[in-house]
Each structure stands twice: as structure tokens, then as C-alpha cells.
Image (cartoon, helix red, strand yellow):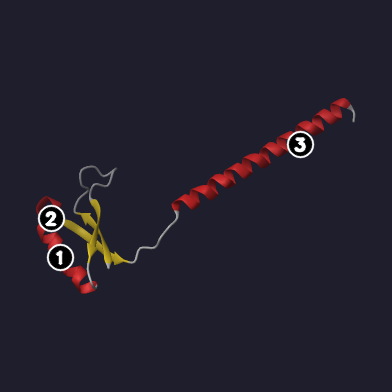
């Protein structure tokens, strides 16, 4: 099973604007306890001294999220709104021309 750990370094890392002090790692483990043990080992090996952590969030079971679908819907909504506004402009032009030409 895959586990994920969001590691937050003490301080702000290299530049607070780009979040260098945040890391997401993946851990393969059979159960929660094994994941905790592997994470503790990773901390001992990689995250001491200047890389010491202030917080960890360990989790599993990612939820699939279709980002392309969100953007497709957003683009469709924008296009529909653009078409609606164009239709209103065309209708106003039509009414203006109808009044001008007397029909």
C-alpha cells in the first residue's frame, strides 16, 4: 500500500515564496505501523540538522481528481458566457438597425 508524508521543515527553507520547506514523499508499506517505522527511518537518515522537520502529515488513499475535466468545464462555461454576451450585442445591434431603417 502507498502512504504519503507531507514533511514541513523548520523555518522557511530556501525562500518562503516558493515553499522549499515542504516536501511530499511516498512510502510503500504493508500497514500503518510499517509506514510509521519507514518514515521514522527516513527522518533519521535525511531530515536532521539544517533539514530538521517541524511537522509531518502521514496519510494514505489518494482520491483521483480529474483536473482536465475541471478546466474543460471552466472553458465551456467561459465560451457559453462569451456567446451569450455576443448574442446580446447582436440583438442590440439588430434592434438599433431596425429602428434606424424603420422596419
Residue at 43% over, 58% down: 65
Name the element at disc 3. helix
Who comes first in sequence, dot 3 or dot 2? 2
Q: Residue beneath label 1, please?
A: 40
Which percent across, then down, holds residue 8? 23, 55
Which percent across, then down, holds residue 60? 30, 66
Work out whether residue 69 or residue 81 is closer to the camera in this orientation and state it: 69
Name the element at disc 1. helix
Q: Could you say which disc has been placed on residue 19 in the image?
A: none
Q: For mark 3, does the 10 Å Cα neighbourhood hold few (<14), some (14 to 19), or many (20 or more) residues?
A: few
Work out whether residue 59 or residue 51 is closer to the camera in this orientation and state it: 59
Work out whether residue 24 or residue 55 is closer to the camera in this orientation and state it: 24
Q: For mark 2, does the 10 Å Cα neighbourhood hold few (<14), some (14 to 19), or many (20 or more) residues?
A: few
Q: Residue beneath label 3, please?
A: 91
Which percent across, then down, holds residue 67? 44, 52
Who comes first in sequence, dot 3 or dot 1? 1
Residue at 63% over, 43% down: 81
Number of numbered discs present? 3
Q: Viewed as shown, does residue 71 lie left or right of 15?
A: right
Q: For mark 1, does the 10 Å Cα neighbourhood hold few (<14), some (14 to 19), or many (20 or more) residues?
A: few
Residue at 24% over, 47% down: 20
Amino acid at each position: 500500500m502507498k502512504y504519503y508524508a507531507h514533511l514541513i521543515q523548520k523555518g522557511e527553507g530556501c525562500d518562503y515564496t516558493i515553499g522549499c520547506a515542504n516536501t511530499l514523499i511516498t512510502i510503500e508499506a504493508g500497514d500503518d505501523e510499517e509506514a510509521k517505522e519507514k518514515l521514522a527511518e527516513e527522518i533519521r537518515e535525511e531530515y536532521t540538522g539544517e533539514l530538521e522537520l517541524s511537522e509531518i502529515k502521514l496519510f494514505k488513499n489518494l482520491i483521483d481528481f480529474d483536473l482536465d475535466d475541471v478546466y474543460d468545464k471552466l472553458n465551456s462555461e467561459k465560451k457559453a458566457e462569451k456567446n451569450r454576451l455576443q448574442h446580446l450585442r447582436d440583438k442590440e445591434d439588430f434592434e438599433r438597425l431596425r429602428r434606424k431603417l424603420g422596419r
